[in-house]
Image (tube, rainbow, N blue to C red):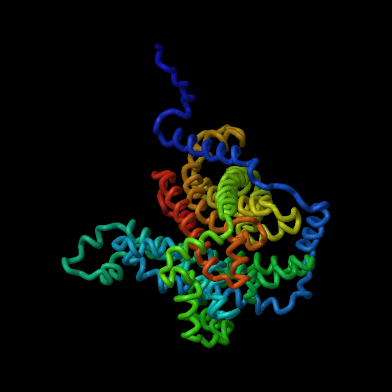
Amino acid sequence: MSDAVTPARPAWLAGRAPGPRLARHTLTLVALALLLLPLADLAVITRDPWTELARMARGLAWPAFGAVESPLSALGLTVAVALWGTLGGVVLGIPLALLFARSRLVRAGCAFVRAIHELFWALLFLQVFGLSALTALLALAIPYAGIFAKVYAEILEQAPSAPRDALPPGVGRLSRLVYTELPMAWAQLAAYTRYRFECGLRASVLLGFVGLPTLGFQLETAFREGRYPEAGALLWCFYLLIAALPWWSHRRLVPLLLAGGAFLLGPWPAVDGGLLWRFVSQDLWPAPLRAGDGAGLADWLAHIPDLAPAIGNTLLLGLLGTVGALLVALTLWPLASRHFGCGPSRLAGRGLLILLRSTPELMLAFVFLLLLGPSLLPAWLALSLHNGALIAFLAARHADALAPGMPGLSATGRYAYELLPRIYPGLLALLYYRAEVILRETAILGMLGVATLGYYIDENFQYLMFDVAFFLLLVTAGLNIAVDALSRRLRPRQVPLDDPCLR
């Protein structure tokens, strides 16, 4: 009996070198997405999306700033929520970062709180604190505390160890932090905090979708009612706010911004301690679990709707969004790179990338939903464009730092043979980091009617079934933690973590 012959892989796919390994990862990811693509509902429901798209484009091109009611107040509240929410995350995250490497419990707690999206935290606190600034601040501060703890701990761990080793024996942990670690890591810590504040601005806008009076509330209302010139004016206000961020968020202005933000956030709600304790200790937990009734708990679980389709749609949309972001990034990053095009074309390319990465996924999905109808297609487009633009922006920045070594190549040759092989490990590493974020965003897109887990979470909150909603939040967090662990295993190890957005 002859031995079975194993077909040989192409030479460029064989071996354990970084290049073939990255090629195998990419092809496996794309092949899996193509294999599962027929299972996704990507139908276009609306009859004439082009007419609606033309109306939206006209509204963005000719915005009606005079029709916007109190734009400065909405912008001010958006900034105040983002600033104080980020500050709360920093204050809570720093002590957790000091314990992060030594405590498995702290690492697990941080993984849990950052796995739940800010909007879901807002839905939780909305039941106790209502439509108040406290709800908004807690919705940002709690997940951001978990994120800051993880990232700060990684940055401090990578700081040079020579200053720490030079300290005399017996020096406390706080002294080592203040005198050796902080001075060495301050630039990276500050850079990541600024980046997280920009993320906080987008999250603050999204809080308007649950009724909080930030800019997103007016945006959602204007789009839903078809007042596109007003929606265009609000979008331009937000884009200008993001574009001017380096100037108005200068560190010398931060105390003034904090004082003004505290004034805009009031009045604060009266906190009923008894109501809060009842919500935390009773409403979030099934009655059979509190009573220790195992048979009753099994019956409670049996009455929960079949979650397999929702979990399947969540994972499928996350996979398609990840692959879509990769394809968008590979297509768009040359538009903003100094190695391609001319000055005006690069300016237009950077403008397009800033516009796409500055618009939150939920807002993009909402717009595509109005155009294309309820299916997975609007959510897929939103996830792919937003995350792909962010990756493309960073890839172009990394490419601009490279010096061409093969003169005389055409633009296509420079892209394929010189630049892309050098930046692709970093691009793929960033894609794996964004995979967990994409899955978090996939869940909240259910609030727009997309059949992911977020749809059932929002529905159960609306019907005041807090125990079921909280159980679904735990399922969502578990999925995010699992995807995050998988993406860490797949991430190229040779890529340094020197860019804040890579974290």
Residue at the extreme top of the image, as rendered: 1
- In the image, residue 265 sits, relative to residue 241, either above or below, namely below
Which sits in the foreground, 422 or 373?
Answer: 373
Tell me the residue at 42%/44% (across/down).
492
Q: Position of residue 14 (x, y in %)?
A: 44, 28
Quadrant housing residue 96: bottom left
Q: Position of residue 484 (x, y in %)?
A: 45, 53
| Quadrant (top left, top right, bottom left, bottom right) of the C terminus | bottom left
Q: Position of residue 423 (x, y in %)?
A: 50, 43
Residue at the extreme left of the image, as rendered: 169
Which sits in the foreground, 24 or 255?
Answer: 24
Q: Is residue 502 left or right of residue 356?
A: left
Which sits in the foreground, 174 or 368?
Answer: 368
Q: Is residue 225 left or right of residue 340?
A: right
| Quadrant (top left, top right, bottom left, bottom right) of the N terminus | top left
Tell me the residue at 30%/70% (across/down).
178
Q: Does residue 75 appear in this view?
A: no
Residue at the extreme front of the image, as rendered: 295
Tell me the residue at 76%/69% (across/down).
230
Q: How many numbered circles are shown?
A: 0
Q: Does residue 458 appear in this view?
A: yes
Q: Is residue 224 left or right of residue 402?
A: right
Q: Position of residue 187 (x, y in %)?
A: 41, 63
Tell me the residue at 52%/37% (across/down).
28
